[in-house]
Image (tube, rainbow, N blue to C red):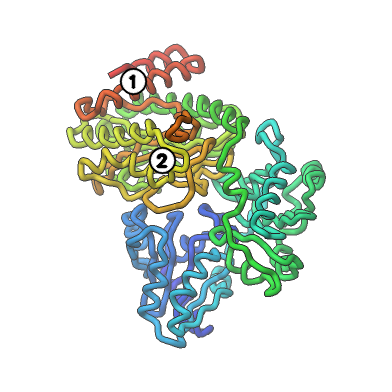
Amino acid sequence: MTKHADRLSALRSEMKSKGIDAYIIPSSDPHISEYLPERFKCISWLSGFTGSAGTLAITQDFAGLWADSRYFVQGEEQLAGSGFDLVKLKVQGAPEYAQWLAGKLQPGDKVAFDGNLASIAVAKAIQDNLVPLGIKVDGHQDLLHEIWPDRPALPQAKAYLLNEDTTGQSTVEKLKSVRKHLAENRAEAHLVSSLDDLAWLLNIRGSDVKCNPVVLGFLLINQQENTLFIDQSKLNEKDKASLLDSGVRIKPYSDALSTIEDLKSSSILLDPKRTCFAMYDAIPASTKIVEATNPSTNLKAVKNETEINHTRNVMVKDGVAMTRFFKWIEENVSYGNLSEISIAEKLYEFRSANEGFVDISFDTIAGYLEHGALPHYKATEESNATLKPEGLLLVDSGGQYRDGTTDITRVVSLGKITDQERQDYTIVLKGMIEGSLAIYPVGTRGYQIDAITRRPIWETLRNYGHGTGHGVGFFLNVHEGPHTFNPSNVDVPVQEGMISSIEPGLYREGQYGIRIENLVLAQALESNQFGSFMNFDTLTICYIATDLVDRSLLDQKHINWLNSYNGWVHWQLAPHLTSEESAWLQEKTKAI
C-alpha cells in the first residue's frame, strides 16, 4: 500500500501549493456514471478502494473514504495501510463528508473538487453546507492531472447502431418524445450527459465502459437540430449517415464544453443528478436552467413490446447457461480444484456460448462462505477461496446480450448445511416470494414494494442493508433508474413495462451471505370500482434450490409459488438442454 500513501502525499503537496485546505473526489466521470472508464477510476488509483460508490475527502491531517454499508468490510480491507480511513455513512448517498468538513474547517478556508466528476446535485450539496459558513468552494480543480503521469487515455473502442427490429422504436420517434417533454417543461434545449440515456435515444451501443454497452458522448437536443459530441473515429460511415438521416449531426467529443459555453438557447433542461457541474457552470448567464430528470430516463424505463419479447428470449439463453453452470459445480466441487475466480470464468464461458452474447453485465460476485456476506464482493488473487463440499456459495451475475440484459443471484449448498443457514435461506426466499406475488394499485412507489418484500424478514428481527431492487436496462446498464425498490422515499411510481430486480438478502459477517434475485416485469392486472391494480411477471428462468428450504417456515402460498416457479423453469429450459441436463434439472425442480 506504499504507493497509495505516496500518492496521497503528492496530492497534499499539490493542495498546499494551490492553497486548498480540503479536496473532494466523488466516484464519477463527466457523465456521472456508476461504472467508470479506466481514466476516471480516481478513487481506486489514489486510495486502492475498488468499490463502485464512495467519496474521498482529504485534508492535510485526515483522508477518509465515505462509503455505505455495502462496502464496510471491503473498505476496511482495501484501505489498510493506504493513509485513508473508512468513514461509515449513516445514510446511503448523503453528503456527510461535506457536513464533516463544515465542522472541521474555518471561515476563509478553501475546498476544491473537479467539476467534471461531480454532479450538479453533489456540487450544490457541497456549496450549501460550506459557503454559508464563509468557506470558499472551487469546483474547477483537477489535482490528479498533476500527479497521475500514466493516467489512461479516453477509450477508443468502436460504437455501432442497433436496428429497429431490436429496439422497437426509431431514433426519430424517441427524439420526438423528448421534444414533447421539453415543450411541457418550457425548455428550448436539453443536454444529455448520461451514457445510457444517450445510448437509448440514438439506438447506439459501444464498449467504452466495462460491462456497460455504452459509448462516451454528449447529446444536445433542441427543437431545430440535434448534435452528438463523440470521437468520430468510433463510427463507420454507414452509421454516421444513418444518424444524419435521423436528424443528428456529429461533432468532436472535445467540442461539447465550448458549445455549451456559446449556447444561444433561451433555456436548457439539465438533470441535476446526471449532469456534471463543469457543464452546468459553463452555461451562459442569459440561459435559464430548468432542472428536471432527463425525459429519456423515464421513457427508457418503460420497455416496449419488442424489448420485452427479446428479454423473455434472452432469459431462456441465460437460464440454460446457469443450469449448466450449477450442474458443473455440483459435479466438480469434490475434486478440490474450483475457486471463486475459476467458477466466475467458467460461468463466463457458459454464457459466451449463447447467441448474441456480448459481455457480462457486471463483475461476477462469486462469494463462498464468509465472502458471500460481502454484497459487492469480487474475488482477487489474494482473497480467492477454494470451494469445498460444504457450506454456502452465493453467485450474483448477469449477461449483456444483443437482445437484453440479465441479473440473477442464487445461493446453493455445497454440503453440510446448518439449521441456521437453512432458516436464513428460507426467510430470504419467503421475502423474495412476497415481493414477487405483490398486488398493488397504480401509483405504488418502490419503497412500498421494498417494505412488502422485507416484512417476512423483519418479522424475524432480521434485515439487510441494501435496496430490494433496481431497474434494469435493455441491452444497457444493469442498474437503471428512475425507479428503485429501497427504503428511500423516491417519488417515482412503478409503471407497466418496467423491469426490476427483487433481491432480498441476509448477511452474517465472517460466516456466509444469502441473496436470491429474480427480474420481474410490472404489468397491469385488473381495474374495478376500487381502482386499477398491477402485479409482477417473473422473467428470470433458473431453478431456486429447495434442499436449503425449511418447509415449516413457509405458508402454503409460498410453497405453491416455489413449486410452480421451479416447474415452469424446467418446462422452459428442457427443450434447450441435453437429456442428461434436463434430467438433472428435473430433479432440482421437484416439488417440495
Task: Tell which of 38 and 490 is nearer to you.
Answer: 490
The image shows residue 234 at horizontal and vertical percentages of 72, 49
In the displayed structure, would residue 117 be above or below residue 451? below
Q: Is residue 381 visible?
A: no
Kindly report the distance in space between the C-alpha atoms of the residues bearing marks 2 and 1: 32 Å
Quarter of the image with the C terminus is top left
Q: Amino acid at mark 1?
A: Asn
The image shows residue 569 at horizontal and vertical percentages of 43, 21
Q: Which numbered mark, 2 or 1, is in the foreground of this view?
A: 1
The residue furthest top is 579
Q: Amino acid at mark 2?
A: Ile
Mark 1 packing: few (<14 Cα in 10 Å), some, or many (20+)?
Answer: some
Say how many tags the image has. 2
Residue pointed to by mark 1 = 563
Quarter of the image with the N terminus is bottom left
Q: Which one is earlier in the sequence, the residue at label 2 or at label 1?
A: 2
Q: Secondary structure at mark 1?
A: helix
Task: Tell which of 419 and 93 is nearer to you.
Answer: 93
Residue pointed to by mark 2 = 341
22 sits to left or right of 301: left
Mark 2 packing: few (<14 Cα in 10 Å), some, or many (20+)?
Answer: many
The image shows residue 75 at horizontal and vertical percentages of 36, 58
Which of the 4 quarters of the picture holds residue 168? top right
The image shows residue 233 at horizontal and vertical percentages of 75, 51
183 sits to left or right of 457: right
